[in-house]
Amino acid sequence: MTADLFETVGDAPPTRETIAEGAVLLRGFAWPFEAELISALRAIVKQAPFRHLITPGGHRMSVAMTNSGSLGWVSDPSGYRYDPIDPDSGNPWPPLPDVLCKLAASAAEQGGFNGFAPEACLINRYVPGAKLSLHQDKDELDYAAPIVSVSLGLPAIFLFGGLKRSDTPRRYRLEHGDVAVWGGPSRLFYHGIAPLADGEHGVLGRQRINLTFRKVR
Ligand code: MD3
Ligand code: FE
């Protein structure tokens, strides 16, 4: 009884929930990696700081981004692309740390995708008010591979639609340590993040960080 009173939510065992064909939510899956994950992130961001990209439509994104891996996702007024070079520094993106690679591969395996070897890890930073409008991820050449996402810091409302933009999205609350695997038919579903609510996270402060691991080609 006393033990229950002092137990934190972070101690609950990871759970696995299928939310669509090919899409699996692994709540708390990243907790065992937390310390290593956050120190790896700090090192990446030192070499390739977060920046607000400009969309082809000329809008500055409210989400700040950086990348790790042999390729990074970038947007500028000429379009979206994967680039081996960070356009801000002229250097290659920081290589994918082992801990990130292992986390992504073991989550993918839990979701039924064996041998996942991501080339790109896009890192998104949300402060309160930042959002990501409904979109499809279709800048990759290989849709057979899943996308693995890891949520850290403040919770967010994830909007999960369907193959058509007009499909009404379902809402899921993604919290610190939650990992999701998006493959099979769900790989091209529309999705987004509602404007982040204000708050303070015990480890990461007033922000949410999301990592998406992708096989690009
Ligand atoms: C469902 N990021 O970077 S992660 C993105 O939380 C992106 O920053 C969001 O959408 C974020 O493109 C959502 C969850 C996610 C990622 C990719 C998907 C869900 C997905 C691809 C297909 C379907
Ligand atoms: Fe996306």
Image (cartoon, rainbow, N blue to C red):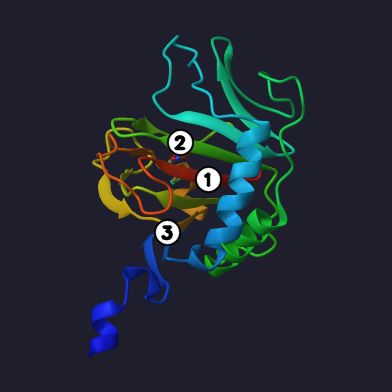
Amino acid type at mark 2? Arg
Is residue 186 in view from this perspective?
yes
Q: Label 2, label 3: how many angstroms apart (C-alpha)?
A: 16 Å
* Side (left or right) of 119 relative to 211: right
Query: For the point 66% across and 45% down, which residue is it?
Result: 215
Is residue 145 in view from this perspective?
no
Mark 2 — residue? 125
- Above or below residue 179? Residue 88 is above
Element assignment for label 3? loop
Residue 58 on image: x %, y % = 45, 9
Mark seen at residue 211: 1
Residue 52 on image: x %, y % = 49, 21
Query: For the point 28% across and 37% down, which residue is it?
Result: 194
Amino acid type at mark 3? Asp
Element assignment for label 2? strand
* Side (left or right) of 143 relative to 163: right
Residue 85 on image: x %, y % = 74, 25
* Side (left or right) of 70 relative to 44: right
